Amino acid sequence: MNEIRQYIEQLKERLNLLLEQLRARVFGANNERLDFLMDSFYKLEPKERVGVLAGVAGAIGFVIIVAFVIYFSQVGRLKAELNDSFAALHELQELKSEYSIEDARFQRVVEQVQKKTSDLQVKPFFEKVARDTLVQLEGLNVQKNPLEADNPLGSKMQEVKVKDLRINNTSIPKVLNFLIEIEKANNYIRVQDLEIRGRFGTRLYFDTKLTARGYAAGA
């Protein structure tokens, strides 16, 4: 509403300035033209005065019409700008409401991830799953890195990577069971890359290398 009042005040100032400029052009800066016209008018014959008055009345009427045209055009422009402002305000309110809903969803996701990962120790977790599924792990290296700058989770979470983890000389069912148990634990750890190679001289056992990715609480 303050912007609307400011715009109305600006419109009044423009109209006053326009009228002042028009008065100065017609009557002169110090009304010297008006004084000259009055002297000239009184020197005219009565019939000539009537003609002059009729001309002046017509000119005044024309000026009034022009003033009204300018006034209503400015009012129409103001109404159009007000309508645009209210439409933009309504759109902004809708976007704000949508943002609040999405932000609440995002916060719930963050809280859920933090709850699941706050006490997670990645290396002991992998070792336990390996024992439960009877597989032997090699090269269990865990890295924690900050998330990308444009990631909305960057200020609340960090990335956890288990790189180049190897499971050698193991059957496919055991490897699959290990991978299923990792993801089924619901600790937001997912297998990112998986490479399985056959071993020379056997069709039952394979060498597996994988990379897993997850999240950890804190930044």
Image (cartoon, rainbow, N blue to C red):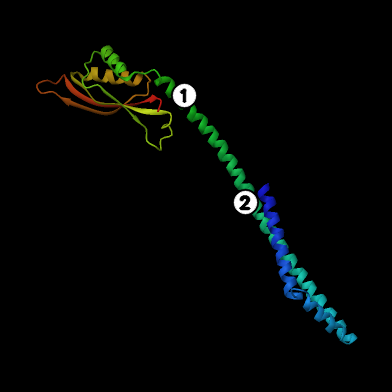
- The amino acid type found where label 1 is placed reads Glu
Q: Is residue 186 left or right of residue 2?
A: left
Q: Is residue 22 left or right of residue 84?
A: right
Identify the residue at image location x=26%, y=15%. Answer: 130
Q: Is residue 185 above or below residue 34?
A: above
Q: Is residue 120 left or right of residue 103?
A: left
User: Whole-percent x and y of residue 32?
Assistant: 78, 77
Identify the residue at image location x=72%, y=66%. Answer: 69
User: Whole-percent x and y of residue 44?
Assistant: 86, 86
The quadrant holding residue 132 is: top left
How many callouts does the rendering have? 2
Crowd around label 1: few <14 · some 14–19 · many ≥20 (10 Å) = some
Mark 2 or mark 1, which has the lower sequence index? 2
Identify the residue at image location x=71%, y=65%. Answer: 17
Q: On residue 185, which mark appears?
A: none
The quadrant holding residue 134 is: top left
Q: On residue 84, which mark appears?
A: 2
Label 2 residue SS? helix
Label 1 residue SS? helix
- Where is mark 1, residue-wise? 111
- The amino acid type found where label 2 is placed reads Asp
Q: Is residue 73 above or below residue 34?
A: above
* Residue reaching furthest to the front: 30
User: Whole-percent x and y of residue 83?
Assistant: 65, 51
Q: Nearer the viewer, mark 2 or mark 1?
A: 1
